[in-house]
Image (cartoon, helix red, strand yellow):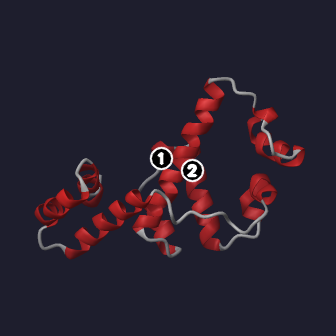
Amino acid sequence: MKPEESIFADALGLEPPERVAFLARACGADATLRRRVEDLLSGYDEGGAFLERLPVPEIDLARDYRDADLTPAEVAAMSYAERLSNDPTSMTDADSQTLRDHGYTDRQIVDITLAAAARNLFSRALLALAVPLEDAPGVSAELREALLSPLGR
């Protein structure tokens, strides 16, 4: 675990006013470390405000985000989320660095990670409870087919 991740994890249990003193002690004179931890905390506190609805038809995203009309940065974020969903134990700092190389801040990377993790949790809960995914109200037959095709349904 990187130093900023460890400090971030410890700071999560503190109220924001207590975090100031904690960060001063934990980061010392290392301004870069403190900025990275503050970015992580800010992203966590804002609860994913960065992630807004993409101006791309959902059917295009459901079929294959690589062929949707996304920017290279958006494709990188989707690829990161896909990897987090399918093979999280193989992820390394290189995965986060790829997003940084596309212009994402650490705060935005936390947002992407938490949004993907929340979506995974929700999906797995629905599957565990045997919720009939085929009967989702407000979802067209075309979109339903695109969403379920990776599951072999």
- The amino acid pointed to by label 1 is Ser
Residue 25 position within the rendered picture, expressed as x and y whole percent measured from the top left: 10, 62
Residue 114 position within the rendered picture, expressed as x and y whole percent measured from the top left: 48, 51
Q: Mark 2 = which residue?
A: 83
Q: Mark 1 = which residue?
A: 90
Q: Is residue 22 left or right of residue 80?
A: left
Q: Residue at x 23, y 69 (%)?
A: 34
Q: Residues within 10 Å of mark 2 (few under 14, many from 20)?
A: some
Q: Residue 152 versus residue 56: which sits nearer the camera?
A: 56
* Up/down of 80 relative to 142, above or below: below
Element on which disc 1 rests: helix
Q: Residue at x 76, y 70 (%)?
A: 69
Q: Residue 91 versus residue 40: which sits nearer the camera?
A: 40
Residue 144 position within the rendered picture, expressed as x and y whole percent measured from the top left: 82, 43
Element on which disc 2 rests: helix
Q: Which comes before the other along the chain, label 2 or label 1?
A: 2
Mark 2 touches mark 1? (CB < 8 Å): yes
Q: Residue at x 78, y 38 (%)?
A: 136
Residue 106 position within the rendered picture, expressed as x and y whole percent measured from the top left: 40, 66
